[in-house]
Image (tube, grey):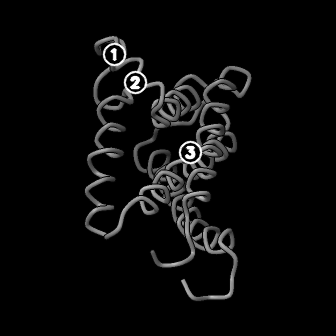
Amino acid sequence: MVTPIRSYELILGKLIPFTLVGMLNVCVVLAVMVFGFGIAVKGSVILLIAISGVFLLTTLGVGLFVSTISKTQQQAMMTAVFFVVMPMMYISGFIFPIENMPKVLQILSLAIPMRYYLIVIRSIILKGVGLSTLWFESLMLFLMGVSILTASALRFRKKLD
């Protein structure tokens, strides 16, 4: 907080290492999926990795936003678990099909980035579709990522309050 760097440089310094680790995880999971379990990717691996990068920036932006609204690490962890991780798991379509949810939760799931990412993963890996089919999901992930990163940058303060 006392370094002579600008706020955006500090934010980039926080995001870049986690983005690289996340992309490494994506590559490892894809390798295990293909070579370990024998599941072929029917679509473009490059498109999958590119959209995974956008999703990573979106989720890292959410984490950065949580850190800007939290005063302590414990508060940040509790906020992340209850207001980010649990909704992403339960109303994104990962555990329960969105079609089987009450209408209110279906509408609420439209604000969850993981909903769109799951559609991308399933569509590229299982169906082999391309960007011409996934443009809406990709656009939503991109817009959510830009929005949350912008909100995080605006909330970020380089000084102690």
Q: Nearer the viewer, residue 118 or 150?
A: 150
Report the amino acid beneath label 2: Leu
The number of numbered badges drawn on the structure is 3
Q: Position of residue 17 (x, y in %)?
A: 57, 71
Q: Residue furthest front?
A: 161
Q: Which element type, helix, strand or loop, lies under badge 1?
A: helix
Q: Which residue is mark 3?
A: 55
Seen at 45% across and 33% down, the residue is 112
Report the amino acid beneath label 3: Phe
- Write down the quadrant of residue 154 in the picture: bottom right
Q: Residue furthest right?
A: 132
Q: Which element type, helix, strand or loop, lies under badge 2?
A: helix
Seen at 64% across and 68% down, the residue is 12
Badges 2 and 1: C-beta atoms under 8 Å apart?
yes
Q: Nearer the viewer, residue 56 or 79?
A: 79
Q: Position of residue 81 (x, y in %)?
A: 28, 51
Q: Quadrant of the C terminus?
A: bottom left
Q: Which residue is mark 2?
A: 108
Mark 3 and mark 2: Cα distance apart in space: 18 Å
Q: Which element type, helix, strand or loop, lies under badge 3?
A: helix
Tell me if residue 51 comes above or below residue 109 in the rendering.
Answer: below
Q: Position of residue 96 (x, y in %)?
A: 28, 24
Tell me if residue 58 comes above or below residue 105 in the rendering.
Answer: below
Q: Nearer the viewer, mark 1 or mark 3?
A: 1
Tell me if residue 47 comes above or below residue 36 in the rendering.
Answer: above
Q: Give the number of the disc on residue 104.
A: 1
Q: Nearer the viewer, residue 37 or 155?
A: 155
